[in-house]
Amino acid sequence: MYSDGELTPEQLAADARAVGLDFIATTEHNSSGAHSAWGRHAADDFLVLLGEEVTTKTGHWLALGIAPGQVIDWDYRVGDRLIGRCLDQVRESGGLCVAAHPHAPYPSGSFMYPYQDLDVVEVWNGLWASDRPWNADNEAALAEWGRGLAEGIRAGCWQPAMGNSDTHLEGQIGIPHTVVFAEDLSMPAVLAGIRVGRSWIAESAAVDLSLTAVAAGHDAGIGERLATNGEPVMVRAHIRGVPSGTVSFHTDRGKVHHQALPDSGVGTAEWHTTWEDSAFVRIEVRHPHGHMAALTNPIVLT
C-alpha cells in the first residue's frame, strides 16, 4: 500500500487469516509508513512482524523485525561498502536480514551482494511476475542456495532458506509461506526459528510435512543437528497434501533419492545414509508437473 501494492492492511490481515497464516510481515519498499497501520490487526493468535523491503540499486533485501518507525537506508549498490552498516542496524534491533528474490528478472532485482553477509536467503518468491507459483527465477535461487549449503555447514555459518508470497495483489498471500517451529507466537520466537533454519516452506496450508533423522538412539528435525556417533542414519519424511507428487532427498552430493507419493497425497518416504556420506539432508516435494509444493531446510549430520 505504501510502495506498489494494491491491498490495505485490513484486506491483507483478513486474507492471511483466511488462508491459515498465524503471522505476516509488512515490508513496504524503503518505508516504515505502514507500521502504525498494523497495530490494530495484531492479536494473540495473529502476529505482525514489522519490516522493510530495502530496494538497493543492485538487489533487494528484507529487514525483518525492526523497530516501529525504523527505516533502513537503500541508496547504495554493491561496491559502495554501505550495506554492512545497514545490516548491522537491523541486527542491533533484534531483526533478521534476508536476501530477497535473488534472481528476479528486472533491473535491480538480481541480488549482487554475498550471501554470507545475510542471515537468510529467500529461495521461493510468489506470484508477483508470473501466473505460475514456481518458475525459473525460484529454481535458480534454490539451486544457488543448495550449492552453497555444504560449504556453509562445514564452516558453521550456513544461511537458512525461506519463502515469501511477496503479496502485491489479491489472491497472492500465502503462496508460498514459511512454516516456523517457534516456542510461541511472538516476534523473538519466530525470528529465532527462522534464524537457525527451524522452518520449511509450503505452497499453501493444504500441504504438511515432517522430516526426522534418527541415529544412535537420537533424533533430530528440520534445522537441528544430529550427532550420529558414526552409526547409520535413517531419514523419514511424511507428506500430506500433494497427490501423485514426488519427494526427493538432497545432500551435499545433490539429489540422492526420490520416491513417488500415492494418489491420496499422504505418504511416507525413508532413506538411509551415514555421516561420512552426507553432511546434511533436506527434502523437496513436487507436483507431477514439476512445480514445487514444499521444501525444507536441512538436518545437519555430525
Image: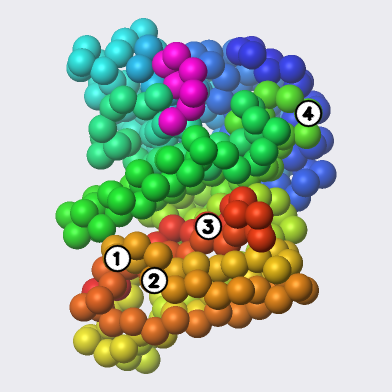
The disc label shown at residue 256, or none: 2
Q: Amino acid at mark 4?
A: Glu
Q: Which residue is mark 1?
A: 253
The image's mark for residue 170 is 4
What's drawn in magenta, residue-wise? 103-109
Q: Is residue 239 above or below residue 234?
A: above
Q: Are marks 1 and 4 in contact (CB under 8 Å)?
A: no
Q: Earlier in the sequence, mark 2 or mark 3?
A: 2
Which is in the foreground here, disc 2 or disc 3?
2
Residue linked to disc 3: 295
Residue displayed at 49% across by 14% down: 30
Measured as percent of width and height from the top left, residue 146 is found at 36, 52
Q: Is residue 150 left or right of residue 6?
A: left
Q: CA distance from mark 2 to mark 4?
A: 39 Å
Task: Tell me the mark number nearer the camera, choosing from 1 and 3.
Answer: 1
User: How much space separates mark 2 and mark 3, taking CA atoms?
Assistant: 15 Å
Which image quarter: residue 16?
Answer: top right
Number of marks: 4
Instruction: Please report contact status of discs 1 and 3: CB closer than 8 Å, yes or no.
Output: no
